Amino acid sequence: MAARAKAGAALAALREDLSGDVFAPDDPGYDDTRGVLNAMTDPRPAVIAQCAHAADVVRAVRFARELDLRIAVRGGGYGLAGARVDGALLVDLRRMRGVTVDPAAEAVRVEGGATTDDLDRATRPHGLAATGCRMAGTGVCGFVLGGGTGRLDRAFGLAVDDLIGVELVTADAERVHASADDNPELFWALHGGGGNFGVATALTLGLHELPQFSVMLLLCLPEFGPDVVRTFREIIRTGPDEVGGAVLYPALDRALCGALLTYAGGEAGLRRLTEPLLALPHTAELTGAEAQGRLCATGGRAHWSAECLTDLPDALVDVFCARAQAVPVPGGFRHMLLPLGGAVVTGPAAYPVPYRDAPWLLHPFARWTDPADDERALAWVRDACADVRPWSTGAVPLDLVGDEGHERVRAGLGAGNLLRLEKVKRRWDPDNVFRFNHNIRPI
Ligand SMILES: Cc1cc2nc3c(=O)[nH]c(=O)nc-3n(C[C@H](O)[C@H](O)[C@H](O)COP(=O)(O)OP(=O)(O)OC[C@H]3O[C@@H](n4cnc5c(N)ncnc54)[C@H](O)[C@@H]3O)c2cc1C
């Protein structure tokens, strides 16, 4: 009874103090606020604190500690790992989406709930860019702190390579700054350790000059899939680091094989690089916003995973195409091959991002609507990864996997880095209150 009265009083005080809104399960608005992009998760947090600024985050963390609640963090809401946040305080940052560009310093400050679209919109007028996500809508903090392989990574490196500073609210509700000079060990750990160490209320990122950016999406009939993949592979092998993209297969609403080419340069240059693909029979050729618009993935049920590949031999191409054609539910399934290399390989090796040297990534992405298809969809993703195990490097980009067990977290952070990360976790979150993530356990 006393505990109930304490919780009631603490909640009333939180409502009073927060500039943003607070939702408990009986409040109107709770159900509209708790949902995420992926209908596979049905999160039921004890309380949602929709923070408006960093002081709100401090107040919300204090509330959670007072009541001994675990703390979950929501940025863009696109995450798969740790999404079941039942009984926790959910710190919802979706009202904190400010982005401030400093063109002279070629840097940007991004608030904790800003999306990669917010970031792109703010930097583009200055002819500057960061390594953004391949698809629209992802939260910048979740994406960057998890590593962040994106559409410009071959040209600029992983998103996390451009991290200059992190403004963090810790498990003790303290505001700290992490950078190369301030709390350097924490700063190191934030390069891949995600939301394990606190709530990032803002990041500062370095930017790159990008006067022009071009995109082309070529759609081919599925029987040409192996030719498309092999031709795409050759363009990546022989082309400059400025070219990247993906093979998406089946692409879009029809079972087509798509080659997406992104280029840190003008359209004429991209066209020249794409000539071998354009020579293949294709049903459509989309460029610019039209191509990018077709790649958005929203709503429904979703599951995905990834494997880093040592190579992309013809045998793997055939396995990939066969699995892509065997999707169990027509619709939004996408089997993807993403090229790494370029500036990803040459980026800083010291950080806990162990997949830099993989030249290719396999990324099966399933999206469907009927819960009756859940089992078949999950099995397809599992089988797609199992197909390529003979060529797997063993490392994995954590941004692109969900809750797949502790061994996968180790594979995503690097076995050699884990002990060091566990020590950082013990220093900053000894009670593991931030556990709804690819969890690093405090030792
Ligand atoms: C359609 C789609 C496309 C994607 N494309 C790519 C891609 O091209 N490249 C890639 O690398 N990944 C990609 N991802 C994966 C995505 O980067 C990760 O799932 C990322 O964690 C999502 O972050 P979020 O803020 O949107 O999600 P959320 O669910 O809000 O957050 C995910 C986790 O990130 C942490 N987190 C988020 N914000 C903060 C914060 N401010 N402070 C502390 N911790 C925080 C928390 O631990 C949280 O549990 C994609 C995902 C989807 C659904």
Image (tube, grey):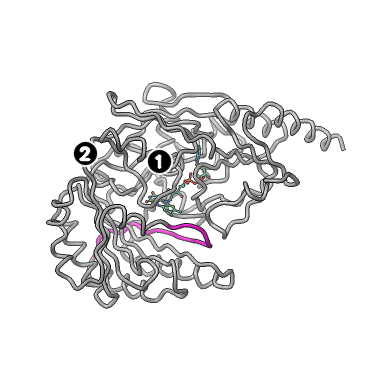
Image height check: is 323 above or below 422?
below
Q: Nearer the viewer, residue 21 or 207?
A: 21
One can see residue 281 in this view = yes
Amino acid type, callout 1:
Val
Quarter of the picture holding the C terminus: top right
What's the residue at 28%, 46% (across, down)? Answer: 152
State left or right for residue 197 relative to residue 208: right
Q: Residue at label 1?
A: 144
Q: Position of residue 215 (x, y in %)?
A: 25, 53
Image height check: is 286 above or below 14?
below
Q: Around disc 2, counting alpha carbons within 10 Å, would you say few (fewer than 14), some (14 to 19), or many (20 or more)?
A: some
Image height check: is 36 above or below 247?
above
Image height check: is 196 above or below 177?
below
Depth check, mark 1 against mark 2: the one in front is: 2
Residue 140, image quadrant: top left
Q: Residue at label 2?
A: 211
Q: Position of residue 404 (x, y in %)?
A: 50, 57
Which stretch is magenta? 297-312
Q: Secondary structure at mark 2?
A: loop
Let me know if residue 303 is in the magenta part. yes
Q: Around disc 1, counting alpha carbons within 10 Å, would you say few (fewer than 14), some (14 to 19), or many (20 or more)?
A: many
Label 1 residue near ligand 1, CB within 8 Å: no
Quarter of the picture holding the N terminus: top right
Q: Disc count in the image?
A: 2
What's the residue at 41%, 40% (across, down)? Answer: 118
